[in-house]
Image: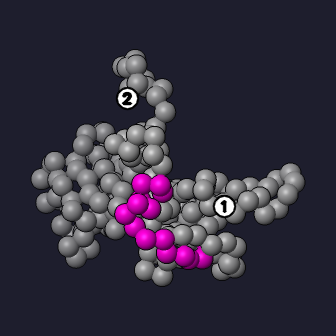
């Protein structure tokens, strides 16, 4: 939308950090307040391929800072990306290659729903609602269906989406692009 209206920030690089930290890296900042907690890094086959100092230092989709090195030298070597993390067991699962299927998911559950359009919330009772959705800043809208499941809402994507993480916001729009509401991914 920023490009459409020729705004000066249209081509501005997305923030990958926390703005109030300044030049301090996220891991440096967090390590001042959280203890180091040694854990393992598994690949998608379940093989231990590295160690880390705390699952909370990593984000889904992260590539840099895994300290795995280039395991396979030569042409065609692909980097690892964080596919999943389990804070309880302090394990990180990584997948090789940016388009690895382990980096994609097809559905999410949402909590803390904020409905801008209360009519859509009422229409959701007992049926699915076709929506357009976004789970990352500046991400193109994609098609999904919402359904109530207990006190939560489940979103099923028409096409699997990459780098979706718990704690991120998901925002949904009607099929004409008008905001309906949003929630937090759990």
How many numbered circles does the render carry?
2
Q: Which residue is mark 1?
A: 67
The reply to whether residue 157 is visible in this rendering is no
Residue 106 on the magenta segment: no
Q: On the image, which quarter does residue 137 sit in?
A: top left
Residue 90 percent across, percent down from the top left: 49, 77
The magenta span reads: 27-41
Horizontally, residue 82 falls left or right of residue 164, namely right
Q: Give neighbour class at mark 1: few <14, some 14-19, many 20+ (Cα, 10 Å).
A: few
The reply to whether residue 14 is visible in this rendering is yes
Residue 46 percent across, percent down from the top left: 66, 80
Which tag, 1 or 2, sits closer to the chain's start?
2
Q: Quadrant of the C terminus?
A: bottom left
Q: Identify the residue at horizontal 31%, vertical 50% (top origin).
A: 171
The residue lying toward the viewer, choosing from 177 and 99, is 99
Judged by depth in the image, the label closer to the viewer, 1 or 2, is: 1
Secondary structure at numbered mark 1: loop
Q: Identify the residue at horizontal 44%, vertical 75% (top origin).
A: 87
Q: CA distance from mark 1 to mark 2?
A: 37 Å
Residue 18 percent across, percent down from the top left: 39, 46
Q: Identify the residue at horizontal 18%, vertical 55% (top origin).
A: 114
Q: Identify the residue at horizontal 30%, vertical 39% (top origin).
A: 176
Q: On the image, which quarter does residue 166 sit in?
A: bottom left
Secondary structure at numbered mark 2: loop
Residue 10 vs 168, above or below: the answer is above
Judged from this view, the residue extending furthest toward the front is: 32
Q: On the image, which quarter does residue 123 sit in?
A: bottom left
Q: Give neighbour class at mark 2: few <14, some 14-19, many 20+ (Cα, 10 Å).
A: few
Residue 29 percent across, percent down from the top left: 42, 54
Horizontally, residue 127 falls left or right of residue 142, namely left
Q: Which residue is mark 2?
A: 1
């Amino acid at each position: 939308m920023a490009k459409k209206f020729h705004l000066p920030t249209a081509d501005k690089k997305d923030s990958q950090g926390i703005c109030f930290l300044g030049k301090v890296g996220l891991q440096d900042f967090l390590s001042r307040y959280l203890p180091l907690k040694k854990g393992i890094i598994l690949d998608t086959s379940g093989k231990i391929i590295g160690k880390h100092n705390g699952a909370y230092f990593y984000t889904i989709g992260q590539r840099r800072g895994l300290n795995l090195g280039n395991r396979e030298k030569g042409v065609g070597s692909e980097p690892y990306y964080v596919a999943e993390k389990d804070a309880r067991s302090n394990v990180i699962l990584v997948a090789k290659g940016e388009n690895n299927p382990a980096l994609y998911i097809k559905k999410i559950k949402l909590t803390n729903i904020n409905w801008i359009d209360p009519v859509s919330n009422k229409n959701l009772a007992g049926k699915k609602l076709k929506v357009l959705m976004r789970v990352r800043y500046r991400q193109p809208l994609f098609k999904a269906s919402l359904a109530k499941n207990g006190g939560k809402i489940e979103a099923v994507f028409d096409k699997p989406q990459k780098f979706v993480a718990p704690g991120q916001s998901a925002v949904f729009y009607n099929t004409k692009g008008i905001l309906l509401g949003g929630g937090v991914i759990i």
